[in-house]
Amino acid sequence: MKRMAVVLAAGQGKRMKSKLYKVLHPVCGKPMVGHVLNTVKATGCQRSIVVVGHGAEAVKAYLGDSSEYVLQETQLGTGHAVKQAKDLLGGEEGTLIVAYGDTPLITPETLIKLMTLHEERKAAATVLTAVMDNPAGLGRIIRTEEGELLKIVEQKDCSPAEDAIREINTGIYCFDNAKMFAALDKVTNHNAQQEYYLTDVIEILRQQGELVLAFQTEDAAESIGVNDRLALSEAENVMRQRIARRHMLDGVTIIDPASTYIGAEVTIGADTVIYPGTLLKGNTVIGENCVIGPSSEIEDSRIMDGAKVKYSVLNGAEVGARTSVGPFAYLRPGSVLGEDVKVGDFVEIKKATIGDGSKVSHLSYIGDASVGKNVNVGCGAITVNYDGFNKSITEIGDDAFIGSNVNLIAPVQVGKGAYVVAGSTITRSVSEGDLAIARQRQENKPGYAEKIKSRAKAKKGQSHPS
């Protein structure tokens, strides 16, 4: 049976008090509407329609060609929103899921169970419900003795007995597509808000003698709709726990999940250990047997098996197998470290390649550079890549030695096996196997230290008379 989905994402979200449209607010680094769209696609939906309104261009720019779109120019209720998809889906036979772009916690597993029940029973509609400890303000589910859905009663219309019911309508539905659109044509806006409600379709189908069911999710958190920053925080907390649990069940050790942030798109291999205070964001991929953290921030980076990152920041970087980074290193976009590399404390690397077995151990800046294999870069060495107008490249060959406090003024090349003496400022290329020294020869003046001290003391006395 063909499966389709309509995701409602037209609301402005005034209660968010934000310039960013509601469904684009991220949960664990991914906009809410992205979570929902991925979820409905994971159920096997062949077509997905996103109903856009406020912020339509921004939503479409984010989702791109992963969805079809219809525009709800004026928000006249949920029924009106779904009806905008009629031109695209009205002639289709099959199962339709209707979900909201601000419910990021709904899972494919729950939707698949909902759709399976719906299709096996050949229902016209099936409502996803949840049991809430505090159902205040939510529509109550009234069932028949056989467990079928009798009606949905909004709290303001509840009798005392109905008000005591804790099973609520999540607002997520499964429909026979053709029957839903036929019933939707009969929905009116004769209500206080003068809006067209999707819940009216349920009542119309029941009056027509159609089978209407309710399926209760096991996890009430899935029904959380994010309408303000408080709910956004709650959704973030639930998803963080889910993500951490998934990784731990897949063989990742997370020392303290409560103090660890792992984004929704992050991949981590088995036997990797994540220490507290670590943030893993974006499309980061971490291999097996790695040690990450404590207190490291890694975004859109790739870290190979056996690597270690400690107290460091990585953004758009690649780290080879068994390579060590940190503490207090900063790898900026375009940094590519080979295998068995060491990047130590207070080292910054930007748009540079470091070959296998090379070391940049401390207090150095390597930018716009190509560093070969088994190179030693001494403490305080710098590639001087910017002249105030242009960036230039530094190339260092395999097995070269760059001494401490060396300035390599790009563009410049240091050949294979060359040796650059500490304290040198190199402005011309160094050939393979050569030694380069670019500093003034040292001169010692016997006994002159005391003369310097005496002059300094005298000057100090003149500046501060007693």
Image (cartoon, rainbow, N blue to C red):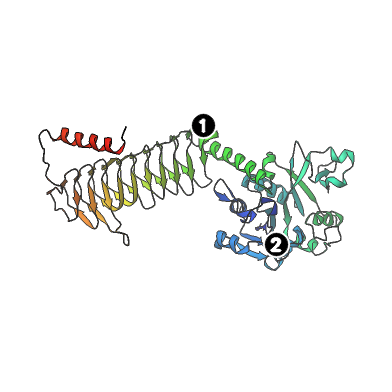
Q: Is residue 84 visible?
A: yes
Q: Residue at x 75, y 58 (%)?
A: 78
Viewer-nearest of discs 2 and 1: 1
* First reached walking from the N terminus: tag 2 or tag 1: 2
* Closer-to-camera residue (459/297): 459
CB atoms at circles 2 and 1 under 8 Å apart? no
Left or right: residue 412 versus residue 152 is left
The mark found on residue 256 in the picture is 1
Q: Give, as a three-letter code, the residue at label 2.
A: Glu
Left or right: residue 94 versus residue 370 is right
Q: Is residue 123 visible?
A: no
Can you give x and y, in whole percent of width and height, for residue 7 in the image? Answer: 66, 57
* Closer-to-camera residue (143/312): 312
* Closer-to-camera residue (117/388): 388
Can you give x and y, in whole percent of width and height, for residue 297 in the image? Answer: 45, 42
**Which element is circle 2 on?**
loop
Judging by the rendered image, the residue that carries numbered circle 2 is: 93
Choose top left, top right, bottom left or bottom right for residue 142.
Answer: top right
Q: Residues within 10 Å of mark 2 (few under 14, many from 20)?
A: some
Classify the position of the N terminus by image quarter. Answer: bottom right
Can you give x and y, in whole percent of width and height, for residue 436 in the image? Answer: 14, 48
Q: Give, as a three-letter code, the residue at label 1.
A: Asp
Q: Residue at x 62, y 56 (%)?
A: 19
Left or right: residue 259 versus residue 210 is left
